[in-house]
Image (cartoon, helix red, strand yellow):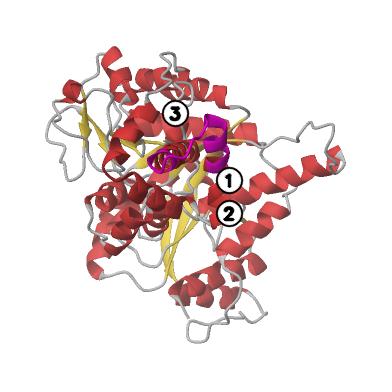
Amino acid sequence: MSNTYVLDSVVIELFRFEDIKLLDGKWGFDAVSNKGLLGLIGPTGILVKSRATPEVLEEFFKWRIVGQRKDGIKSGVLVVREKPSNSFDEYFHNRCSKIRGFKIEILTVSEIIEKLSNRTKEKFRITPEEIVEQKTLTDLRIELATTPPTEEESWEETRERYISEVHDILSEGNLVLFLGTGVGAYSHIPNWKSLLTQLRFRLIQRKLNERGINTNEDDCTALAEEFPGKLGLDPLLSAQYIRRGLRNTFIDDIVDILYDDLQDQNPTLQAIGTLCSAGNLKAIITHNYDDLVERQLMNHNIDAKPILQGGLHTNNSLPIYHVHGFLPQHLEAYDISEYSDVILSEESYHQLYQDPYNWVNLVQHEHLMHHSCLIIGHSLTDPNLRRLLYDAAHREGSSWHYAIFTRETPKNTVNEPRPPHGIEVDYLKIHHRLEEAAFRDLHIKIIWIEDYPDIPTILERIRIG
């Protein structure tokens, strides 16, 4: 039986005896007792961790400040699996001596069971020695998503709270921007799917022409769009297929496609530039190959430096980590002699999986662990990123992150049969809550928007607070 099941079971048992509400990641706490827990003055915030460490305690204090300011949290309980060490006890008492009007208790599984057993005639169903495997906190969060509480915070209210939290993190100098292909949409930079389709078009056209087969653009386009499905190729396999076919021209073809229809005006990138001008941003991590962020920051007179594979940040400039490769339109602008390789194919992902100490993994994991990231224009379907998010989220003292996502809306189609409008609206509420619950397991809070053009407004509100 894993330690997680032990701790989850204790929290679930607490629901039977105390007025406790699962928070689904709110403030970073796992649950709250509005009336107070085990003699503490309420509301009491509850955080569940496997061990008590200085990093965990600092995380607890961080959420204490947020909870006190926004919702009047007056006490806290840190639930741990094993008794803290003597050295930690000394650290804990020294740290708590500086805090007035807020009592914190650290309780092990055994201590909670003993306290509850003394207060109720009903036997506590679990013991540290004999744990019955039952629902985890993740299961409860999914149940919570499909069964809305009687007093439900609207998604707009939640967004306001998250915007305020991100502003505070930015002010503290602890915010990292995590950028995906969506930030280049206004500039007509192709997303991953479109890039692969256009690369496939070039491959098909060249191979047929090499064999003296006359083709036209419509035929090649149709083949490029249809072939992945017919061959059963997922995107990574398709990229590997294309790379081997194009061989030496692969990188040059990507560069041509990236900047083929480049547009100057990009409100999202302009808002990112303005946000960076606040001066407190820790770093930018981008999965994009292009140099549009660098250009935008140049326009804002911000000293920024692209960091490539294996590179280190050694000065006071704002680092921009290109973890999937860097293909600027003009190499000479960055004093680079040749294009870097890119992470695009199945082979390159296998290399990341096999080497946990790869620079790409270390840079992302380090920032996910120790800083809060604002994720923009990213679908979060990248398999390696999800692996890193999961690993970071399940380590002690790891940070929480924020992702800007567009809410789904009922489709207004005339010719397609659809369920009644009311049913679709109700299901979409459940769908969004399920998404929130799933991403909280990766320590990600979703900042919902109604449409992509809302992103610049959100970024500006984060900047000004």
Residue 352 vs 421, above or below: the answer is below
Secondary structure mostly seen in magenta is helix
Task: Tell whether label 3 touches label 1 (CB within 8 Å).
Answer: no
Q: Is residue 316 left or right of residue 123?
A: left
The crowding category of the residue bearing disc 2, from other C-alpha atoms within 10 Å (few below 14, some 14 to 19, many at least 20), is few
Q: Quadrant of the C terminus?
A: top left
Of all residues, the one furthest to the front in this rendering is 212
What residue sits right under mark 1 in the picture? 226
Residue 95 vs 113, above or below: the answer is above
Residue 145 vs 286, above or below: the answer is below
Which residue is more in the foreground, 334 or 307? 334
Task: Tell whether label 1 touches label 2 (CB within 8 Å).
Answer: yes
* Comparing labels 3 and 2, the label whose residue is closer to the camera: 2
In primary-sequence order, the first of circles 1 and 3 is 3
Can you tell which quarter of the image residue 408 is in? top right
Which residue is more in the foreground, 16 or 169? 169
Where residue 147 sits in the image (x, y, percent)?
Answer: 73, 54
Where residue 308 sits in the image (x, y, percent)?
Answer: 21, 39
Q: Is residue 159 visible?
A: yes
| Magenta stretch contains residue 341 | no
Q: Residue at x 67, y 80 (%)?
A: 121
Residues rendered magenta in the picture: 208-223
Q: Residue at x 40, y 14 (%)?
A: 264
Q: Marks 3 and 2, Cα distance to the nearest angstrom?
A: 31 Å
Q: Which mark is residue 230?
A: 2
Q: Marks 2 and 1, Cα distance to the nearest angstrom?
A: 7 Å
Of all residues, the one furthest to the bottom in this rendering is 130
Q: Residue at x 56, y 63 (%)?
A: 137
Residue 93 vs 158, above or below: the answer is below
Q: Which mark is residue 183?
A: 3
Q: Which mark is residue 135?
A: none
